[in-house]
Image (spheres, rainbow, N blue to C red):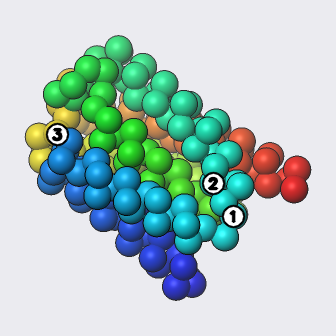
């Protein structure tokens, strides 16, 4: 892992922890982290592409999850800090999380299905969101949906990379 990847991952983790601990108060410092992630990017065009095209996909998924009552936030349909958090996550796709793109699709999907719900479970433990189902049902339903959505983002990203 390169130093740039480590910094990218650390900045994302900073945004994640700020969102959990500070919620709306995290927006300005988290935006600074996102700006720094973009500034340090070696593939700025690709990262802008992800923010323009993949962020709406991710936010539509979050909206759908709240509409289906899988989870809820204090602000409907979701708070702005989640938009910033998703922006930071998308800026890891071509840097610290690019290993996902090198895996067979089913392994990338499985990793996302297993680990993504853990992040939301942590959010529930920090009381920044509410999980509306028994945890095992949430993990299966949300994990499968989130993994499918994120796999679509990875495929979209790979297609854009192939056009370079």
> Under tag 2, what secondary structure?
helix
Q: Nearer the viewer, mark 1 or mark 3?
A: 1
Q: Position of residue 123 (x, y in %)?
A: 21, 45
Q: Position of residue 4 (x, y in %)?
A: 54, 79
Question: Label 3 vs label 2: CA separation?
Answer: 27 Å
For the residues bearing labels 3 and 2, Cβ distance under 8 angstroms: no
Of mark 1 and mark 3, the one earlier in the sequence is 1
Q: Position of residue 108 (x, y in %)?
A: 58, 53
The residue indicated by pointer 2 is 47
As drawn, 119 above or below 134: below
Question: Label 1 vs label 3: CA separation?
Answer: 32 Å
Q: Nearer the viewer, mark 3 or mark 2?
A: 2
The residue indicated by pointer 3 is 128
As drawn, 75 above or below 120: above
Of mark 3 and mark 2, the one earlier in the sequence is 2
Query: Looking at the image, how many numbered discs can be counted on the residues?
Result: 3
For the residues bearing labels 1 and 2, Cβ distance under 8 angstroms: yes
* Residue 111 relative to residue 49: left or right: left
Residue, x 62% and y 38% (percent of image)? 52
> Under tag 3, what secondary structure?
loop
The residue indicated by pointer 1 is 43
As drawn, 87 above or below 53: below
Location of the C terminus by quadrant is bottom right
Residue, x 46% and y 66% (percent of image)? 36
Instruction: Estimate how packed mark 3 is, as few (under 14), some (14 to 19) or many (20 or more) residues with alpha carbons within 10 Å.
Output: some
Instruction: Estimate how packed mark 1 is, as few (under 14), some (14 to 19) or many (20 or more) residues with alpha carbons within 10 Å.
Output: some
> Which one is nearer the viewer's eye here, 18 or 148?
18
């Amino acid at each position: 892992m390169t130093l740039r990847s480590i910094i990218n991952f650390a900045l994302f983790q900073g945004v994640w922890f700020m969102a959990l601990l500070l919620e709306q108060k995290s927006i300005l410092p988290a935006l600074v982290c996102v700006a720094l992630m973009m500034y340090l990017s070696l593939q700025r065009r690709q990262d802008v592409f992800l923010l323009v095209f993949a962020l709406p996909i991710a936010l539509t998924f979050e909206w759908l999850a709240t509409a289906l009552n899988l989870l809820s936030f204090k602000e409907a349909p979701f708070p702005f800090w989640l938009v910033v958090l998703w922006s930071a996550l998308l800026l890891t796709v071509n840097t610290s999380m690019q290993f996902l793109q090198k895996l067979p699709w089913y392994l990338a999907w499985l990793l996302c299905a297993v680990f993504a719900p853990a992040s939301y479970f942590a959010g529930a433990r920090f009381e920044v969101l509410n999980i509306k189902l028994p945890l095992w049902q949430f993990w299966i339903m949300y994990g499968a949906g989130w993994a499918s959505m994120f796999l679509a983002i990875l495929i979209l990203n790979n297609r854009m990379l192939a056009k370079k």
